[in-house]
């Protein structure tokens, strides 16, 4: 009776000691740490605002910009909307301005509100605005500079490669919006320059805003059934074009040309249906954008004509 | 530990100390948890408070625009001040995760207050259209503030999600720990209490066992108690008692043994003395001699002399028999008669002898050599010294359950001191009064079988009582 009770209790004590120590260690392990209050003096804040956050193109721009900002100890935030939604895009821009950020990298939007914001508000707070990827006319926006591809030149090169495959009197159909963005206008200029003096028929198809893209594409294909070269100045239109074409005709007969800043550009390239595309350098743009903003912050003058990043015309595969 | 009380103290102190320590540790950790929870909540509430402030500002601005008045103006300025005051506070909430948004927040508030001030000035200057435009903007800014609040709160929640999970995990770990500690303490205290009570009950049990052993007469097992407290002291005392009892018993035993040995050796000595006495004389020669003398005397015509010689032979024969035999009363009486006849021949008329004997009783057994020595005493010490001589009377009769033998002489008598001396004489020395008394006592196992009365000048009477069985007495008493 004696020894058994003592033995039993001793075993209990040893067991509980072991368990207890383990539990204690566990308690001290899970010490929750509050994130330390940052005593860093005000660091610089830049924002990157785009209307097409969900495209691979702009994601790369963001990556490039963020990496460069981190390197330089600058805080960068990516804002904007997901599908060419003007309202929330402009809202974000106004928020950034009122929040007195130190620099704005923004995808250019050529409308009155944008101009108002860039010209008046940003200037009022002394915030430099640099357009990235897509430019706007300098006079109306007073943007400090532009970083991105020379759209006019790129389009010209693309059109040249298209023209080189066409025979006399063949048609090159160019799709663009009825109210085109500044980039599109520039691209059209480039195309015209490439076609000038060539015996190619240039068809400029302006897609109305009210009409569904599918419907207008259908109409286009109806009206120009014999066209063998199609170019979309807005890269996202290419998806619908391919879709509609695939319903109707042999794809091999037709050559497609576009730019690489569309939503589904990766998928399209994978299908192999594209012949030539303009491949831009979005990561470089992002990086350069941040560098330029900082340059401005440190008082250097910027070239208002813009800093062009390189591009290539590549096979669509 | 010297005292039981001390042991209790120590046990209780240890228990209290352990529990105190555990309570302190647990409380500390819980407090830490609580503090961190509070910190987190505080942040949320501060951020939220800001939003309320801004919406109040907008409301009062609106009121001022709709109905400009000093009151509205002052209220608005109050709100502006408040916001400006708290703006600093907001910056303290900055951490690595939310630095960007916090700074946005802070600047947005600044923009709002600037715009608000501007609006108030415009209203003062009656520029209502401009004021309205600015108010639209102020509204938008207030909305941005709300948006940023939401962003901040969302970011906070994400940041602190991890922390919060940790807190919960910690709480649970703590609960587990507390439970295990409770079990541990229970086990420890049970063990401690058990040990403690064992140190009490074990000695008590040992003492009980020892007492039982003593009660049953086993005095040899030592009482061994190991503790150093009061119980040990008790056990020690107990053991001393046992040892001294043991010693007393041993001493008694030794004494008794010695006495027994002494008695035995004394008896042996007496026996050997008698034997040696006996062996000193060759009995056969004496008998033959006496016989011859007796015959010769008879032939010479001296019949009395012949009778006397026969008496002497009888006496001698009786003397040479084993002295520790039991004999009949009749034999003793015969010896007495023979002795008296010899003595009467010597003392002639000076010595008279009378007998009164109940012949029925003479078959009872008694030790030998009891009557003759007494008769001899009566003759030599009682009658002989008396000039005119005297009479020795010998009576045997029933008396009160015994056979009473009376030996009376009317001789000199004795003083009380002489009587006392008789009783106190050494029974071993010679066959005398004391010896007879002792042998009677040893034979019958009673010490009240002889008495003696004497008066100086009157005489001496000795009584000997031979106890009878009830049946024998009844038989003789009819």
Image (spheres, coloured by chain):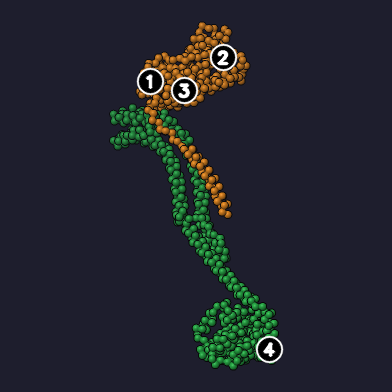
Chain colours: A orange, B green
Which residue carries the number 3 mark? A67
Residue B466 falls left or right of residue A40: right
Q: Can residue A316 be seen at all in this image of the molecule?
A: yes
Q: Of discs 1 and 3, which sits in the foreground? A: 3
**Mark 3 and mark 4 in contact (Cβ < 8 Å)?**
no
Same chain under badges 1 and 2? The reply is yes
Query: In the rendered image of this protein, does residue B183 appear above or below residue B43?
Result: below
Which residue carries the number 2 mark? A315
**Residue drawn at 41 percent across, 14 percent down:** A305
Query: In the rendered image of this protein, does residue A83 appear above or below residue B389?
Result: above
Which residue carries the number 1 mark? A297
**Residue drawn at 50 percent across, 39 percent down:** A26
Residue toward you, A305 or B275: B275
Q: How far is mark 4 from mark 3, CA to CA? A: 176 Å
Judge the density around disc 1: few (<14), some (14-19), many (≥20) Cα neighbours within 10 Å: some
Judge the density around disc 4: few (<14), some (14-19), many (≥20) Cα neighbours within 10 Å: some
Element class at badge 4: helix
Same chain under badges 4 and 2? The reply is no
Disc marking residue A311: none
Residue B342 falls left or right of residue A130: right
Q: Of discs 4 and 3, which sits in the foreground? A: 4
What subunit carries mark 3? A
What subunit carries mark 1? A
Element class at badge 2: strand
**Residue drawn at 42 percent across, 33 percent down:** A36
Same chain under badges 1 and 3? The reply is yes
Disc marking residue B297: 4
Give whichever of discs 1 and 3 has the lower sequence position: 3
Residue toward you, B451 or A293: B451
**Mark 2 and mark 4 in contact (Cβ < 8 Å)?**
no
């Amino acid at each position: 009776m004696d020894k058994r009770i003592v033995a039993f209790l001793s075993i209990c004590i040893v067991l509980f000691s072991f368990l207890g120590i383990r539990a204690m260690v566990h308690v001290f392990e899970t010490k929750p740490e509050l994130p330390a209050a940052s005593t860093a003096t005000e660091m610089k804040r830049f924002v990157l605002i785009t209307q097409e956050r969900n495209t691979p193109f702009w994601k790369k721009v963001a990556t490039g910009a963020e990496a460069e900002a981190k390197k330089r100890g600058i805080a960068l935030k990516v804002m904007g909307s997901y599908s060419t939604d003007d309202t929330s895009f402009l809202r974000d821009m106004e928020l950034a301005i009122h929040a007195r950020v130190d620099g704005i990298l923004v995808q250019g939007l050529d409308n009155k509100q944008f101009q108002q914001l860039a010209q008046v508000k940003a200037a009022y707070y002394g915030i430099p605005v640099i357009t990235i990827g897509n430019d706007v006319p300098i006079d109306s926006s007073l943007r400090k500079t532009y970083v991105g591809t020379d759209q006019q030149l790129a389009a010209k090169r693309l059109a040249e490669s298209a023209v080189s495959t066409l025979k006399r009197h063949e048609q090159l159909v160019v799709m663009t919006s009825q109210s085109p963005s500044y980039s599109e206008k520039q691209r059209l200029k480039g195309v015209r320059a490439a076609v000038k003096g060539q015996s190619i028929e240039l068809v400029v198809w302006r897609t109305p805003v009210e009409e569904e893209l599918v419907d207008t594409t259908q109409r286009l294909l109806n009206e120009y059934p014999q066209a063998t070269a199609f170019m979309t100045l807005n890269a996202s239109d290419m998806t619908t074009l391919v879709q509609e074409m695939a319903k109707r005709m042999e794809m091999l007969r037709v050559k497609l040309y576009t730019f690489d800043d569309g939503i589904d550009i990766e998928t399209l390239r994978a299908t192999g249906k594209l012949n030539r595309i303009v491949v831009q350098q979005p990561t470089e743009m992002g990086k350069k954008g941040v560098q330029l903003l900082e340059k401005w912050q440190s008082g250097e003058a910027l070239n208002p004509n813009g800093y062009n990043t390189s591009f290539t015309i590549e096979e669509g595969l | 530990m010297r005292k039981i009380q001390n042991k209790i103290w120590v046990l209780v102190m240890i228990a209290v100390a352990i529990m105190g320590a555990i309570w302190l540790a647990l409380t500390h950790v819980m407090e830490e948890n609580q503090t961190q929870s509070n910190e987190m909540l505080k942040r949320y509430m501060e951020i939220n408070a800001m939003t309320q402030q801004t919406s109040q500002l907008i409301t009062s601005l609106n009121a001022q625009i709709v109905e400009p008045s000093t009151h509205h103006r002052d209220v608005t300025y109050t709100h502006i001040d408040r916001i400006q005051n708290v703006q600093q506070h907001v910056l303290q909430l900055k951490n690595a995760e939310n630095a960007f948004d916090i700074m946005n927040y802070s600047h947005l508030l600044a923009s709002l207050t600037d715009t608000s001030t501007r609006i108030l000035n415009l209203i003062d200057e009656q520029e209502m259209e401009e004021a309205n435009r600015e108010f639209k903007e102020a509204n938008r800014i207030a909305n941005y503030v709300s948006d940023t609040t939401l962003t901040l709160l969302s970011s906070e929640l994400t940041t602190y999600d991890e922390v919060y999970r940790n807190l919960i995990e910690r709480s649970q770990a703590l609960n587990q720990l507390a439970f295990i500690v409770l079990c541990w303490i229970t086990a420890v205290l049970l063990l401690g209490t058990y040990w403690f009570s064992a140190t009490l009950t074990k000695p008590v049990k040992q003492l009980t066992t020892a007492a039982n052993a003593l009660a049953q007469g086993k005095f040899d097992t030592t009482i061994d108690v190991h503790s150093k407290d009061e119980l040990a002291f008790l056990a020690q005392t107990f053991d001393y008692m046992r040892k001294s009892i043991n010693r007393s018993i041993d001493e008694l035993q030794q004494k008794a043994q010695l006495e027994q040995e002494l008695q035995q050796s004394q008896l042996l000595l007496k026996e050997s003395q008698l034997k040696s006495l006996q062996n000193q004389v060759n009995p056969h020669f004496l008998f033959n001699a006496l016989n011859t003398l007796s015959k010769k005397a008879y032939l010479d015509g001296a019949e009395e002399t012949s009778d006397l010689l026969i008496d002497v032979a009888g006496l001698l024969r009786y003397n040479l028999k084993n002295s520790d035999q039991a004999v009949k009363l009749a034999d003793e009486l015969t010896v007495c008669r023979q002795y008296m006849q010899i003595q009467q021949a010597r003392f002639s008329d000076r010595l008279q002898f009378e007998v009164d004997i109940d012949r029925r009783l003479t078959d009872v057994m008694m030790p030998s050599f009891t009557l003759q020595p007494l008769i001899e005493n009566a003759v030599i010490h009682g009658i002989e010294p008396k000039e005119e001589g005297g009479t020795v009377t010998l009576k045997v009769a029933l008396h009160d359950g015994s056979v009473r033998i009376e030996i009376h002489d009317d001789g000199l008598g004795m003083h009380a001191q002489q009587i006392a001396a008789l009783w106190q004489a050494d029974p071993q020395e010679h066959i005398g009064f004391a010896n007879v008394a002792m042998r009677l006592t040893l034979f019958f196992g009673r010490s009240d079988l002889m008495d003696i009365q004497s008066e100086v000048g009157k005489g001496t009477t000795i009584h000997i009582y031979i106890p009878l069985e009830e049946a024998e007495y009844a038989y003789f008493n009819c």
